[in-house]
Amino acid sequence: MMKRLKNWRLFSLLAALTVFLAGCGQEELSTLLPAGQVGQDQFNLLLLSSAIMLLVIIVVVIIYLISLVRFRRSKVGEDHMPEQVEGSHTLELIWTTIPIILVLILAVPTVYYTYKLGDVTAMGAVDEDGNAENLVVDVTAKLYWWEFEYPDLGIVTAQELVVPMDEKVYFNLLAADVKHSFWIPAVGGKLDTNVENVNKFYLTFEKDSKNLKDGVFYGKCAELCGPSHALMDFKVKTMPRAEFDQWVVAMQATDGQMADADATDGEALFAQSCIGCHAVSGVGTTGAAGPNLATFGDRNRVAGYMDHTEESIKEWIKDTQKYKPGNTMPSFPQYSEAELDALAVYLMGLKVEE
């Protein structure tokens, strides 16, 4: 019976480790597979600190095992008195100097990368014509969704960050309600979004997201912010600069786009009930009560984590609190199945990508 119980405990431990390590090989989500220079720098620091800790553990274990073998009672006898080394200047020097050296080995690159990755002096750089030289994105974290504004391009989107590859992208981070934290595990981060001040940093994206399993990198809120904290995801699409420029043009072409209250079915229903909180034009500024939906049909998730299907849209609209407790969107259980179908079709048609 006891043997069976021990085997069950071992099996449970291995199962838990399997679940824990399952994310280590996912390119869109894993910090162990960096997809940008910032992520690579942070990964290098992780390797260095892990190597130092492993070295200390190995040395301590070796000393312990040597002591255990050489000075076991059966070998040295009951009355053996080991050599007394109290007050030894040599030993004091060794176990004081070695930790200092190890701390310096870790501290020097840590301080270097801290200042390197925090250098945002080029964020406001402009060329001779007064145009911004670098892409800047204003990120606003809300309960429980993300808003992304491109101030120099005049466009805004939500839940899906679109960026060009192989160049620095600068971020201004702010929270609209409570503290959140902006983190793209495979690319770099994380950094808090605060209500009272703006945090700034940059990331580089060196891998095209369309080659990934879901076509996107996954972003997370890394600061406990409420009952739906674990569901506060966003997605990141990376693409060559030429494709990004095309996406910008397509977004800017939605300027003035609105749902028509005189239209039939889903569009009219949206204009009557949803337009007060949700924009369907990608041109604008931040501050809307709800996510911008101009690119809703191009996304791969509903509410940040549900399958991107018409059925998920309908379930979400009927009872938002069931799927994301604490969010600020009202539910609409009064809609008929036909109205929900029409609304889902309209939302899926909001696209800017071909």
Image: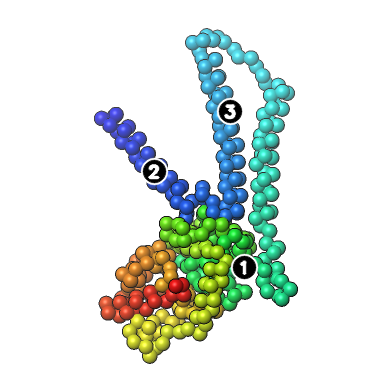
Element class at badge 1: strand
Q: Which mark is residue 18?
A: 2
Seen at 53% across and 72% down, the residue is 246
- Which residue type does callout 3 highlight? Val
- Which residue type does callout 1 highlight? Leu
Seen at 52% across and 80% down, the residue is 253
Judge whether 16 appears above or below 130 on screen: above
x and y percent of residue 273 in the render? Answer: 39, 82
Image quadrant where residue 64 sits: top right
Q: Badge 3, how many Cα within 10 Å: few under 14, some, many 20+?
A: few
Q: Which residue is mark 3?
A: 59
Element class at badge 3: helix
For the C terminus, give its image quadrant: bottom left
x and y percent of residue 167 in the render? Answer: 61, 61
Q: Which mark is residue 135?
A: 1
Disc 1 or disc 2, which is closer to the eye? 1
Q: Which mark is residue 319?
A: none
Residue nearer the viewer, 310 or 349? 349
Type of colouring = rainbow
Judge whether 288 appears above or below 302 on screen: below
